Amino acid sequence: EAGVTQFPSHSVIEKGQTVTLRCDPISGHDNLYWYRRVMGKEIKFLLHFVKESKQDESGMPNNRFLAERTGGTYSTLKVQPAELEDSGVYFCASSAHSRPTKNIQYFGAGTRLSVL
Amino acid sequence: GQQVMQIPQYQHVQEGEDFTTYCNSSTTLSNIQWYKQRPGGHPVFLIQLVKSGEVKKQKRLTFQFGEAKKNSSLHITATQTTDVGTYFCAGRPPGATGTASKLTFGTGTRLQVTL
């Protein structure tokens, strides 16, 4: 079974540009989460989808960030326009709705975003 | 909002020594999960603790959840170089039992093990 996959693995952009990150969750996982780890700090929650609906977007820093999950499969996180403080590693995680792995979040390898 | 702190931030041990990281939440948790992140890697789920006072073991790793469900610890006996990485606790808020919800991650403890 494939794990959570994220693309790209690394993105280097200039301040003011737009970047779109993609996450493919584990097949069948209704729950999809985005997290971010800024250099040396803790992993912080951004938002949570249940299928195609946003369940909790309390962690989204501002309106420059837009997340979508059309069709309830893969998700994208767009940053427009990017600022220097957006640099960090963006992780996606997914979890199943039912046992035996209910609510265990499986993380992707992350996208390292560098804004210059 | 909920805050989860971990101590120490960093620990360097010699192989064979024991290691413990402590996790403290500002609020009661419904459950707590532990993750390990190798250098350059991503968080990998280790275990979930749900009940007050629960203790679980995985080989050389012992996990504990406090009676008040506000703190937790991870103890590694006789560390090996393969234990190197950052260990994060992550809590789920009260009322989250049985439902999917975000994790609030601790600040992490970076473990370095040398021969």
Image (spheres, coloured by chain):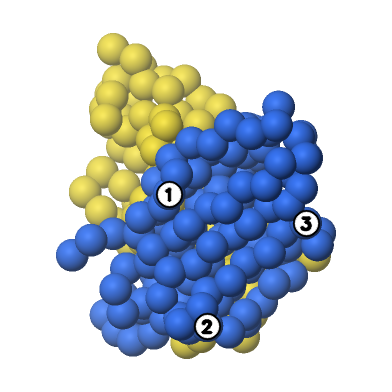
Q: Is residue A72 above or below residue B37?
A: below
- How many marks can you see? 3
Residue B71 sits in quarter: bottom right
Q: Nearer the viewer, residue B105 or B24?
A: B105
Observer able to see residue B40: yes
Q: Quadrant of the C terminus of chain B?
A: top left
Among numbered discs 1 and 3, the one appearing first in the sequence: 1
- Contact between marks 2 and 3 (CB within 8 A): the answer is no
Q: Nearer the viewer, residue B66 or A54?
A: A54
Q: Is residue A87 above or below residue A77?
A: above
- Identify the mark at residue A7; answer none if there is no mark: 1
Q: In the rendering, at what x and y percent does residue A82 appear?
A: 74, 44
Observer able to see residue B25: no
In the current view of this chain or complex, which residue is farthest to the left? A1
Q: Residue at x 56, y 42 (%)?
A: A89
Q: Nearer the viewer, residue B59 or A10?
A: A10
Instruction: Specify the colour of chain B.
Output: yellow
How far apart are the two marked residues, 1 and 3, measured between alpha carbons? 20 Å
- Identify the mark at residue A64; answer none if there is no mark: 3
Q: Is residue A100 above or below residue B15?
A: below
Instruction: Specify the colour of chain A.
Output: blue
Please give the residue where the numbered disc 2 appears in the rendered image. A52
- Identify the mark at residue B69; answer none if there is no mark: none
Q: Please tell me how crowded label 3 is: few (under 14), some (14-19), or many (20+) other residues with Cα within 10 Å.
A: some
Q: Residue at x 47, y 20 (%)?
A: B12
